[in-house]
Each structure stands twice: as C-alpha cells, then as structure tokens.
Image (spheres, coloured by chain):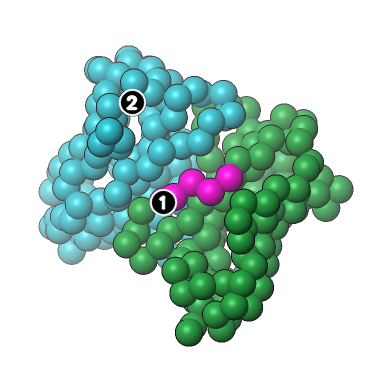
Chain colours: A green, B cyan
Amino acid sequence: AQKVTQAQTEISVVEKEDVTLDCVYETRDTTYYLFWYKQPPSGELVFLIRRNSFDEQNEISGRYSWNFQKSTSSFNFTITASQVVDSAVYFCALNEGGYNKLIFGAGTRLAVHP
Amino acid sequence: NAGVTQTPKFQVLKTGQSMTLQCAQDMNHEYMSWYRQDPGMGLRLIHYSVGAGITDQGEVPNGYNVSRSTTEDFPLRLLSAAPSQTSVYFCASSYSAGGNTEAFFGQGTRLTVV
C-alpha cells in the first residue's frame, strides 16, 4: 500500500540554521510523483516542487533544495540559512496511478526563531 | 486569476444539520478533488472528479456527497453533520489527471460541528 511518512512532527531552529525535513514513501508503482507543499500560518497550501520517479536529479531553488533517492525511498527537503518566514507546516505527498490522488504525510511543523 | 475559490471560509453546524461547501475554479481544470485536514494526519482525499459528470470516492468518503455538473464547480455536501466531521476542508484542482501537474488548492473551509 502507498504511504508517506514524515517522522519529524515538529522542528525548532534559530534563524540562519540549515534544516532538513525528511520524507519516506512506500509505493509498488514504478511511475509516481512526489510533491512538497508549504502551509504557512495563514492556512493555504503552497506548491513547492514536483518530482517524477524517473528523475533522481537533486534540485536547488534559492535556499531550498531537494534530495530524491529511490534506493532509500526518500525525498528530503533542505532549507539553507532558514528565515522566520520559513515557519510553516510542510507536507510531502505521493501521487501514483494518476488522477492526482495525493497521499499526504502527516506534515512537519517548522518553527524558525529570530 | 482567482484560482480555486472556496466558500464559506468558516462554518459552525449543529449535529444532524446538512450543508454544502462550495468550490469553484476558473482555470478550466478537468480534475478536482476534496480533502480534509485533521491534526497529525495530513490531508486525506474524500472525493474526486476527473471531469463533468464523473466522480469517485477517495479514502474517506462516508458522510459526504459530491456532484460535478460543470467543469468549474465541485460542491461537497454533508448529509447529516457529525462532530467527527469537524475539520478543515480543502478543494483542489489540476490541469491533468495524470499526476504530472501540481494541484492548486483553495483557501480552505474550517468546519466545526457541535
């Protein structure tokens, strides 16, 4: 069965620290998609990144980077030099079989303190 | 573009009452879905639709009905509200059903059933 595990429930860091949010997934499919969404205190869900199962290249976008490793079924997210504005709940999600039927992890609440 | 619009933003219901959560998108997306978000559980899929006239159940469909008469609208009906349906509800839409595009989420509806 498909499943997404975000083992870190809450993380607290001080501004400018680097932080990595872990995501481990389970799927039987060879074709699937992985996503990260950010939910700031205002409550909306903001899309951050999509990665398909055939593309294991790491990606960097500004202070954000993602490490996708099929061998360990992980899709981890690193924020470099964290800022207070990064404080949010971050969700990792898996889509297999199409129809955008997303399976979400429980989320990791990140608190960045000044 | 308004994107995905949900109404109302907040609602309090008494047990046994019925109501409809509205969702509209102006991006001409074929695929729409409803999720509920509960603490510590991430988001779970309630119902989804791959086009006008076509709907199907997600992970937690009991107590909810949907219909899709137009591409733009995808209302979620609570037939007889129960305290277990207290949650934050998100509507989402995406361009394709293939999973290779991100889902756009509405702002959410916070529902309390007393």
Q: Nearer the viewer, residue A96 or B25?
A: B25
Q: Residue furthest right?
A: A71
Q: Amino acid at mark 2?
A: Met
What residue occupies the far top of the structure in this picture? Answer: B53
Tell me which chain the residue with mark 2 is part of: B
Magenta stretch secondary structure, dominant? strand
**Element under disc 1:** loop
For the magenta stretch, what is the residue range? A45-49
- Image position of A111 (left or right of A57): left
Q: Please give the label number shown on residue B27.
A: 2
| Residue A64 drawn at (x, y percent) | 62, 58
Picture quarter containing residue B63? top left
Checking the image for residue A84, the label placed there is none
Depth check: give the residue in front, B103 or B88.
Answer: B103
Q: What crowding class fits label 1: few (fewer than 14 Cα within 10 Å), some (14-19), or many (20 or more)? A: many
Check disc 1 and report the residue beneath it.
A45
Confirm whether residue A78 shows in the render: yes
* Left or right of B47 in this view: B23: left
Q: Is residue B82 visible from the viewing direction of this image?
A: no
Residue at x 78%, y 42% (from the top left corner): A57
Q: Are marks 1 and 2 on the same chain?
A: no
Q: CA distance from mark 1 to mark 2?
A: 17 Å
- The percent position of residue A102, horizontal first and vertical second, equals 53, 40
Residue A48 in magenta? yes
Res B113 quadrant in image: bottom left
Q: Residue A73 in the image: x percent, y percent?
A: 78, 49
The disc numbered 1 marks a residue on which chain?
A: A
For the residue labelled by badge 2, is the local secondary structure a helix, a strand or a loop? Answer: loop
**Which of the pair A27/A40 is nearer the observer?**
A40
Q: Quadrant of the N terminus of chain A?
A: top right
